Image: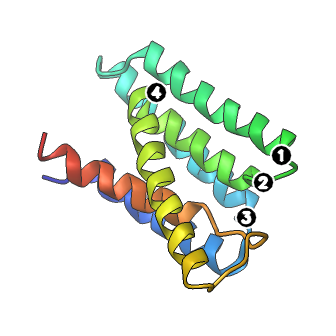
Amino acid sequence: MWEIDQICCISLLLLTAVIDFRFRRIPVYMLAFLNLLAVVWQLYRFFGQKGDMGTLIGGIGVGAVFFLVSRFTEEGVGYGDSWVILILGIYLGLWEVLEVLAGTCLLLAAVSIICLAVKRMSRRRTLPFVPFLAAGYLMSVLCAGYT
């Protein structure tokens, strides 16, 4: 069912999501700590012969792409959000982080459409991204058991 690393990841993502939802900022020290945890996890996996360098580099590449998106959209996607995606890319690898991002974008689009349709928000208003990222990760983990 659930592995300990998945429980830790969703717990930390939920904590980060609450902070992002409430303050619209994620503290740098928290992001640095989560980044360190992801790197330590990958080192553990590499020395346990379960790691794959290609997917790890791909996951880091996805995070780097989102940093570029943050830069060129003047933080349309915030730097904190990009850093969380980088951390997930280090932790999960390329294909899993893309799966999480696909679910995240689907959820975010659905909520945005509903909020616009019922006139609860305008087009200029932004939504915090990390809560949707946490929900996307949770969907990914729950759906993985059914494939």
Ranked by sequence position, the earlier of labels 2 and 3 is: 3
Q: Which residue is mark 1?
A: 73
Picture mark count: 4
Mark 1 → mark 4, Cα distance in angstroms: 23 Å
The answer to the question of whether label 1 and label 2 lie on touching residues, with beta carbons closer than 8 A, is: yes
The kind of residue tagged 1 is Thr
Which of the numbered marks, if any, corresponds to residue 94? 4
Dot 3 or dot 4: first in sequence order is 3
Label 4 secondary element: helix
**Observer able to see residue 20:** yes
In this rendering, which labeled residue sits more in front, label 1 or label 4?
A: 1
For the residue pair 46 and 107, the one nearer the viewer reads as 107
**Relative vertical location of residue 99 with respect to residue 64 in this rendering, above or below:** below
Can residue 41 be seen here? The reply is no
SS of the residue at dot 3?
A: loop
Q: Secondary structure at mark 1?
A: loop
Measure the alpha-carbon separation of dots 1 and 2.
5 Å
Q: Which class describes the residues within 10 Å of circle 1: few (<14), some (14-19), or many (20+)?
A: few
Q: Badge 3 local density, few (<14 within 10 Å), some, or many (20+)?
A: few
Residue tagged by mark 2?
76
Measuring from the top left, give residue 13's x and y in whole percent: 48, 61
Q: Which residue is mark 3?
A: 27
Secondary element type, mark 2: loop
In the displayed structure, 56 sits above or below 104; it is: above
Judging from the image, the colouring scheme is rainbow
